[in-house]
Image (tube, rainbow, N blue to C red):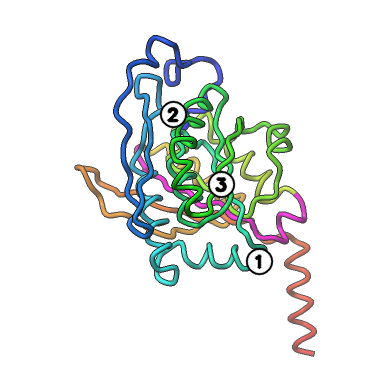
Amino acid sequence: MAAQQGDGSEDDATLSPVTAAILLPPTEHCLHSINSTVFIRQLPSQGLSFQLWPAATTFLTLLDDHRRNPSTGPLGPTLTALGSRRPPLKILELGSGTGLVGIAAAVTLGVSVTVTDLPHVIPNLSFNVKANAAVLAANGGVVHVAALRWGEAEDVEVIGREFDLIVASDVVYHDHLYDPLLKTLRLLITGGEEAEEEGRVFVMAHLRRWKKDSAFFKKARKLFEVEVLHVDPPCHGSRVGVTVYRFAGKKSSKKLLKANNANANAIA
């Protein structure tokens, strides 16, 4: 989760030399499919972006399951289709926070992943990437770290659009960031004919906490085709479990016209 607060708010204070010395032991996250472990440093006193959240661990589990058996998991159809179009797969993670999902994706899929967040989150994100350099190298994974502000077209231009898949976990949190996040997704997924032709998608793990979350999905469905890939059972006293969604661009008028013409020709 990344709060995407760029104004030094109380949700994500800038990491200071004093508090940086007060660290929790790194958490260990087992990837049973490759008999390896990912280590993640959390800094809870620094804000939301420096902590792990349930959706991230769900995403890691699904990636691990996919590595073990690609044909049966909920991520299988999406990852297989994307990987067959233009290998090797390139992934972008939004609101990476501690980087668990991006690092796990690079390790389990053996691909290049760019993890992103606000500038003040980058030092801890980079630390976690370096801490997992050995397991990344052993499995053919590469992780790049970059700053990215949601809603800023120039940031998307700097990052580039050469990604096949965009991922995130627990990023639908602050309602004032719904529109900036959707703008960034629109630029990445439907930003131009090339993006539409290549069928880029966004896969997001999310734990609904408030009714206001519905406003994000209502807006999202106006821009994208949204489907549910996976739902965790409720745990720890929650009424709902983590849900994994797939966002894809709606078919453009040009695409629909082309499809209709093809059907007409076939009938003729």
Q: x and y percent of residue 188 in the render?
A: 66, 46
Residue 267 x/y as whole percent: 75, 89
The residue lying at 47 percent from left, 31 percent from top is: 2
Mark 1 or mark 3, earlier in chain: 1
Residue annotated with mark 1: 85
- View extreme (top): residue: 18
Q: Give the amino acid at mark 2.
A: Ser
Which SS class for mark 3?
strand
Using the numbered discs, state the Cα–Cα distance from disc 1 to disc 2 in whole angstroms. Answer: 33 Å
Query: Which quadrant is the N terminus positioned in?
Result: top left
Q: Secondary structure at mark 2?
A: helix
Residue type of the residue flagged with mark 3: Val
Q: Quickly name the residue at label 3.
A: 142
Which of labels 1 and 3 is toward the front? Answer: 3
Please report the bounds of the magenta region as a residue range.
Answer: 192-209
Q: Residues within 10 Å of mark 3 (few under 14, many from 20)?
A: some
